[in-house]
Amino acid sequence: MLSDRVETIVVDGLGLAQELRGQMAADVAGIIAQGGRAPCLAVVRVGEDPASVSYIKGKRRACNRIGMHSVEHVLPADTPENDLLDLIAKLNQDEAIDGILVQLPLPRPLRANAVAAAIDPDKDVDGVGPLNAGRLLMGDAGLFACTPLGILEILDRHEIPLEGAHAVVLGRSMIVGKPISLLLQRRNATVTMCHSRTQGLAALCRSADVLVAAVGIPHLVKGEWIKPGAAVIDVGATRVDGEPVGDVDFQAAQGIAGLITPHRRGVGPMTITMLLHNTLLAYRQRRRSHAEGRHVPETRA
């Protein structure tokens, strides 16, 4: 019924990202004004995947706009794994580098897990390495995956209550599903993790106060799957007929969801923003550890 419809807030992820980047630009300017050097992000790309080329261009542009340095290392697609690991080892030792990001996906037969494990955890600004994943699991501080941090920032900025809320996470990847479920648990939400083979998926989604969809199945989440007033975070980005499509039926969710992220200018801009945040955080932590002779990790999560 029309009277049952709620006002749906559509998240302006780009606007929020620009606000946060403005704050980081001021932080970087302050560092430089005090005689420090700008934080530096090293990006490694293997091969010429068009999407990877585009993503890295966006990351480089974002770094430049806040006064952060970025360096790019491009290797041919047939680069042996040992050569890639040697490059990472050099970047680990380079005191001018604060963050290291190896752009995924990697060409076969390169192993993403082995590459992630080779990155110094204190420079692992993508939060994909085993030590930072373990820190998240254990409830310790560390550098955590960028998309989940961006999701948490969106929920906080819109004052979505998490303590005691029921959160349903669709997806179990190490990049989104698993880390966001742990971050939500840290905030005292009760989390149900689901995937494409979960039985009774529609009913579980309808029970969620916060619903995070990150499975890569276009329009998996129907309007009737959404609890009225729920916060819905759509991380999906699958191309259908050349156009990006989210995991949530955005139009069907209007008037049901209390808050929803669009598949364009929703979570995406926040992911890059949290990469910048992690790089700035890694810079500060490394400077502090050098000054104190030890490493003191911190996190905003």
Image: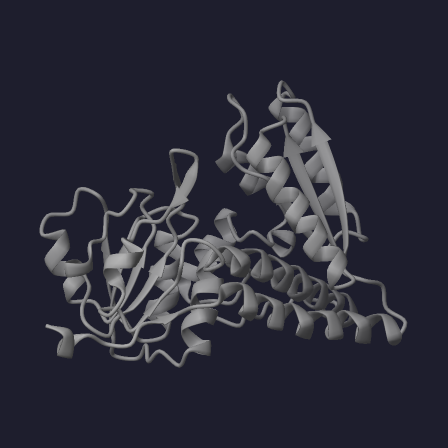
* Farthest front residue in view: 2
| The image quarter in which residue 57 lies | top right
- Expressed as whole percent of the image width and height from the top left, the position of residue 71 reads 77, 45
| Residue lying at 18% horizontally and 68% vertically, measured from the top left | 227
Horizontal side, residue 221 vs residue 179: left or right: left
Q: Is residue 296 visible?
A: no
Horizontal side, residue 40 vs residue 54: left or right: right
The one nearer the camera, 162 or 6, is 6
| Residue lying at 65% horizontally and 50% vertically, measured from the top left | 59
* Farthest right residue in view: 35
- Expressed as whole percent of the image width and height from the top left, the position of residue 101 reads 63, 45
- Expressed as whole percent of the image width and height from the top left, the position of residue 277 reads 62, 64
Q: Quadrant of the N terminus?
A: bottom left
Horizontal side, residue 52 vs residue 39: left or right: left
Which of the colour schemes (rainbow, by chain, secondary structure, one colour) is used? one colour
- Expressed as whole percent of the image width and height from the top left, the position of residue 261 reads 39, 62
The one nearer the camera, 54 or 251, is 251
| Residue lying at 80% horizontally and 53% vertically, measured from the top left | 95
Query: Where 281 sits versus 173, above or below?
Result: below
The one nearer the camera, 93 or 37, is 37
| The image quarter in which residue 154 lies | bottom left
Q: Is residue 255 visible?
A: yes
Query: Where 92 sits versus 51, above or below?
Result: below
